Amino acid sequence: AQSVTQLGSHVSVSEGALVLLRCNYSSSVPPYLFWYVQYPNQGLQLLLKYTSAATLVKGINGFEAEFKKSETSFHLTKPSAHMSDAAEYFCAVIQGGGATNKLIFGTGTLLAVQP
Amino acid sequence: NAGVTQTPKFRVLKTGQSMTLLCAQDMNHEYMYWYRQDPGMGLRLIHYSVGEGTTAKGEVPDGYNVSRLKKQNFLLGLESAAPSQTSVYFCASSLATSNTGELFFGEGSRLTVL
């Protein structure tokens, strides 16, 4: 069965610093991986996705993630944090054959950005 | 553009009471989902539907029932609420295209069971 593990439930960075949010996956088949963002009191929205094309995936708001099969990782990065990036970030993987788009989510990482 | 709308946004119940959460989407999506979000546990899939008149169980279906009588609506019911069902519930929808993984979420419904 597919699953994802997010390392670090809380991450704090200074404005302008590098953002690195970690996600490792477990899958017996080539995975389809996603990062979602949740701003306070809102639903989740898709940040970026990996669907077996390019291993470096660019998303919205300057975020990107790199799929590394050898490390079973899909870490999310942003070169320079902005105050507006403060949110909770979820890594996710499609379950099963993917036909129904059922997502399995990680436990989330809350990103705080300090001025 | 409303997208995915959930009602009510907040509700307080006593143990044993029943209630229904309504999800409506105006994007003509085939697939709809109900998730619950709890601190430190991420989102867990309760039930989902791949089309009008069809429903299926997710990871944590016990204590919940769902119905999809109309394509645009997906109802989540609690027949006898328990404190363990205190949570934030999210509805989502997606196109009937496999492996896109792009779900559109509502803003959530916060339920407290006393």
Image: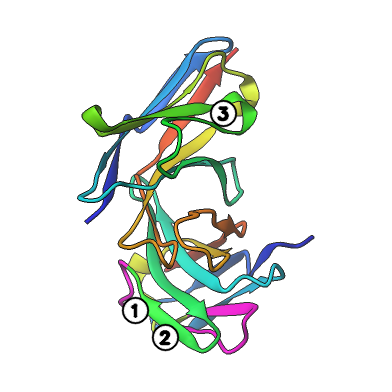
In contact (CB < 8 Å): disc 2 and disc 1: yes
Q: Which residue is mark 2?
A: B79
Q: Which residue is mark 3?
A: A86
- Label 1 crowd bin: few (<14), some (14–19), many (20+), radius 10 Å: some
Quadrant where the image shows the N terminus of chain A:
bottom left
Q: Which mark is residue B63?
A: 1
- The answer to whether tags 2 and 3 share a subunit is no
| A1 horizontally vs A39: left or right | left
Q: Chain of mark 1?
A: B
- Give coordinates of residue A63: x percent, y percent: 55, 27
- Give coordinates of residue B48: x percent, y percent: 44, 73
Q: Chain of mark 3?
A: A
Q: Chain of mark 2?
A: B
Q: What secondary structure prevails in the magenta region?
A: loop
Under mark 3, the amino acid is: Ala
The residue located at (63%, 21%) in the rendering is A83
Mark toward the start of the polypeptide (2 vs 1): 1
- Element type at mark 1: loop
Task: Report the number of numbered marks.
Answer: 3
Under mark 1, the amino acid is: Gly
Q: Which residues are magenta?
A: B59-76
